[in-house]
């Protein structure tokens, strides 16, 4: 009996964390907030305006003119009213043609030039690269008058999007430079091995270089797609006289003028214009980021 009484009993585990553990957790949380404060502020800076646009697009006509931040009733029919606007689907079709076909032409025409500048050794190679860089520095507004006279007066293509699409078949300076920097990161040993196996330059490009350059190609494709999708200046110059050739960026300005008091419809149209770009970047962001971060490794 004495031994049983003298045996020490196990100490019951304390309920919940101790004061020291709570203090450590609080310090860890404050440290995380301090380290990521700039990132959190930047995220809110970009996200909050988009949230405001989406919420306003779901308000009624009367509530959109008030200071309310959230809809009293969720008016999903605003998006249907936007689609029913005459010409909106035409703007969509024209934008898809301009951005889609233009992106394909840019990639197809820029890849061979970038490959030649990255892997070929020929006289005038540095001069060619300098010309490409100089074209990147040339504002498009500088040459807009002679280009307009050529396309509109000589070829009679005003009122269409072809003056914007056809030049993409001859390469883009920014795409060539970005892809050339990416191709420099591909070891020459792979190309030499392909040539030893009997591949010519074209087959080496198709079979070896293109599969390894997918991130870089995805990056220039997304850059070009975004630029064409959001382009306002080009359609205004060449297609403003023909409403059947308007794109979403230019048509949105007309839509806003026709519904200048219907802020809910204007915001709904804005969301419909932004949504495809956000969706494309969301699904391709991994390849895009990889393609951009791997450029410029070699000079």
Image (cartoon, rainbow, N blue to C red):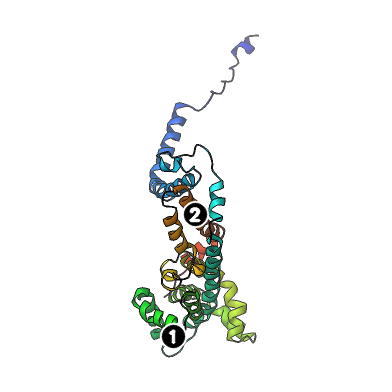
- Residue 269, disc: 2
In primary-sequence order, the first of circles 2 and 1 is: 1
| Real-space CA distance between mark 2 and mark 1, rounded to the nearest whole angstrom | 36 Å
Label 2 environment density (alpha carbons within 10 Å; few <14, some 14–19, many ≥20): many
Q: How crowded is mark 1: few (under 14 residues within 10 Å), some or many (20 or more)?
A: few
Counting from the top left corner in percent of width and height, residue 4 is at 64, 12
Specify the quadrant that holds the C terminus. Answer: bottom left
Cβ atoms at labels 2 and 1 below 8 Å apart: no
Dot 1: element: helix
* Left or right of 208 on screen, residue 40: left
Q: Residue 233: in sight, yes or no? A: yes
Question: Badge 1 is on which residue?
Answer: 154
Res 296 seen here: no
Q: Where is residue 186 in the image (x, y as percent from the top left)?
A: 52, 74
Q: Position of residue 206 (x, y in %)?
A: 61, 79
- Counting the numbered discs, the total is 2
Frontmost residue, 152 versus 276: 152
């Amino acid at each position: 009996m004495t031994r049983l009484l003298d045996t020490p009993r196990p100490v019951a585990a304390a309920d919940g964390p101790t004061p020291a553990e709570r203090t450590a957790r609080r310090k860890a949380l404050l440290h995380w907030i301090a380290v990521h404060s700039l990132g959190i502020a930047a995220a809110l800076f970009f996200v909050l305006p988009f949230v405001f646009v989406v919420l306003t697009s779901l308000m009624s006509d009367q509530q959109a003119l008030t200071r309310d931040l959230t809809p009293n009733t969720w008016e999903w029919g605003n998006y249907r009213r936007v689609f029913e606007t005459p010409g909106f689907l035409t703007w969509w079709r024209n934008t898809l043609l301009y951005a889609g076909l233009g992106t394909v032409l840019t990639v197809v025409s820029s890849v061979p030039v970038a490959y030649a500048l990255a892997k070929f050794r020929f006289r005038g190679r540095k001069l060619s690269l300098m010309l490409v860089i100089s074209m990147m520095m040339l504002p498009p507004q500088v040459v807009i008058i002679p280009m307009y006279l050529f396309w509109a007066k000589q070829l009679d293509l005003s009122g269409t999007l072809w003056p914007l699409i056809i030049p993409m078949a001859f390469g883009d300076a920014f795409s060539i430079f970005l892809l050339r920097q990416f191709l420099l990161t591909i070891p020459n040993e792979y190309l030499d091995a392909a040539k030893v196996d009997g591949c010519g330059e074209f087959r080496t490009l198709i079979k070896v270089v293109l599969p390894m350059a997918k991130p870089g190609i995805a990056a220039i494709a997304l850059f070009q797609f975004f630029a064409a999708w959001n382009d306002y200046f080009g359609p205004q110059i060449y297609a403003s006289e023909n409403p059947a050739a308007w794109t979403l960026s230019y048509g949105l300005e007309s839509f806003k003028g026709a519904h200048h008091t219907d802020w809910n419809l204007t915001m709904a149209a804005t969301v419909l214009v932004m949504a495809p770009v956000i969706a494309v970047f969301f699904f391709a962001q991994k390849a895009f980021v990889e393609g951009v971060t791997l450029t410029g490794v070699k000079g």
